[in-house]
Image: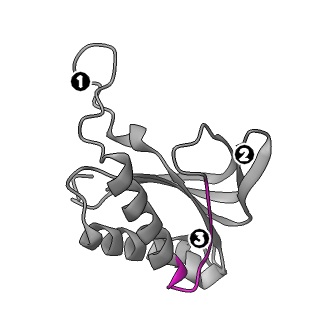
Amino acid sequence: MRAVVQRISRAKVTVENKIVGQVGKGFLVLLGISQDDTQDDVIFMAQKIAGLRVFRDTEGKMNLSLQDVGGQMLVVSQFTLYGDCRKGRRPSFVQAAPPEKADELYQSFVAEVRGQGIHVETGQFQADMDVELVNEGPVTLLIESNKEF
């Protein structure tokens, strides 16, 4: 499982000119699911992301988590995070999970984060989405459940 986590002041997802998810201060998470991912990956990623200490404390240090600041999370499924561009010019997506598995683990991730008391909004699975955000900092992190980066 791979995630691009961006600290935001606000973000929204629009599908066919209709807002389907919108949050204020918190995280925009672009989430990719691989063929090999399991519920263990979901739990690891949900706990890791919810607990990331990247919000400023009273001394200006990145020392507070999403939970500490009462932040929100917008989660957008993005299979292209498993695009392999090492050969040729057209990415290969063979490592991405098939849609049924990806949707199941995506929904499980959202439920796991909500279970930690965080307000979560989502994009629309398999839709052509417009994602808008204001990246605060900017702070952008890459996280992978197999800990390769």
- Considering every residue shown, the one lying at the far top of the view is 88
Residue 99 vertical placement versus 29 (above, below): above
Please tell me which of labels 1 and 3 falls first in the chain.
Answer: 3
Q: Which mark is residue 54?
A: none
Residue at the image point whose x is 63% and y is 77% from the top: 59
CA gap between label 1 and label 2 equals 31 Å
The amino acid beneath tag 2 is: Thr
Numbered disc 2: secondary structure: strand
Residue at the image point whose x is 57% and y is 82% from the top: 67
Q: How many residues crowd mark 3 within 10 Å: few (<14), some (14–19), many (20+)?
A: many
Q: Quadrant of the N terminus?
A: bottom left
CA gap between label 3 and label 2 equals 26 Å
Which residues make up the magenta segment?
114-123
Please tell me which of labels 3 and 2 falls first in the chain.
Answer: 2
Numbered disc 3: secondary structure: strand
**Residue 136 visible (yes or no):** yes
Contact check, label 3 and label 2, Cβ < 8 Å: no
Q: Mark 3 highlights which residue?
A: 55
The amino acid beneath tag 3 is: Phe
Q: Nearer the viewer, mark 3 or mark 2?
A: 2
Q: Mark 1 highlights which residue?
A: 86
Q: Mark 2 highlights which residue?
A: 14
Is 11 placed left or right of 120 in the picture? right
